[in-house]
Amino acid sequence: MRRGIRLLYIGLLVVLPLEPSFPGESNQAYDRINLTASLESKASQDTLIAILYARSTGANAESLAHEVNGALKSALETLKKVPDVDYQTLNYQTQPTYQDQKVTGWSVQQSLRLESKNLDALAGVIGLLQKTLKVESIDYMVSAEKLREAEDHLIAETLKGFASRADLVSKQLGRKRYRIVTLNVNTHSNNHQPLRANRAMSLEGSDAASSPVLLAGEQIVSVTVEGTIELQAD
């Protein structure tokens, strides 16, 4: 895992004598230093989420609903036989279509969400389901547990970096001791990389219903520690 801490900002502010912060503490003046340390690394995307849907349009809403329900029922029967793939149905929509401000027909649609850490299993079942469903999107992401693990590691390393710089600043300014006044820890991750369906992925029919090629990548995870230290006057 590649890591690199970079010091983003160092500021020096001399303040007036402060009131004692703790009982029994003498009234002394401190210099305040604002420090920021940042660290980032890459986490492998181990989870894929696919959204598929069935949609029918025409003049009879009831028959359209029957077609969509049949497609979803068939898809669910297929998914029951596939291990390592979690699934759930999503929103069901029935909308009118208009021409010259008059209702001329209906559009019925329902979506299906698939999630798996097994890329081969998910790609295979998508290929099967494309006989009756269309692919709306495929998102790559880092699982919650793996993201938490990466963040915890970065937090620990970034705090070490912050402390190291605090020690460095203190020594360079001729002070032996400091204390932390404020400390903020922020994490960030763009934890979705969508792959929108292209024409080849949405064509119907057995000839077009091939399994998509899925290759997960890496996700940048970053942690920033911002804080203020007070250098104790010797």
Image (cartoon, helix red, strand yellow):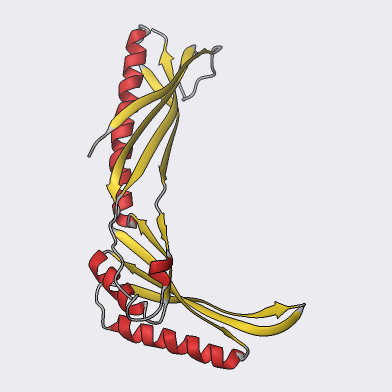
Name the spot of residue 143 as percent of width and height, x first. 32, 57
Image spot of residue 16 (x, y percent): 56, 12
Tell me where residue 199 appears, x and y as whole percent. 43, 67
Q: In which quarter of the image is the C terminus?
A: top left
Q: Position of residue 136 (x, y in %)?
A: 45, 68
Question: Is the residue 120 above or below the residue 61 in the image?
Answer: above
- Residue 86 horizontal side relative to residue 230, left or right: left
Left or right of 118? Residue 206 is: right
- In the figure, 204 relative to 59: above or below? above
Residue 162 versus residue 100 in the image, above or below: above
Residue found farthest to the front: 207
In this view, the residue farthest toward the right is 101
Which residue is found at the position 70% from the left and 78% from the top? Answer: 98
Asked if residue 118 shows in the view, the reply is no
Pick the residue in front: 100 or 163.
100
Q: Residue at x 31, y 80 (%)?
A: 79
Residue 109 visible, this orientation: yes
| Tag count | 0
Q: Say if 127 sits above or below 227 in the image.
A: below
To which quarter of the image does residue 58 belong?
A: bottom right
Q: What residue is shown at x 29% (from left), y 61% (from top)? A: 214
Q: Examine the image and state in which quarter residue 107 appears.
A: bottom right
Residue name at image x 47 percent, y 24 percent: 23
Looking at the rendered image, the quarter that the N terminus falls into is top left
Viewer-nearest residue: 209 or 13: 209
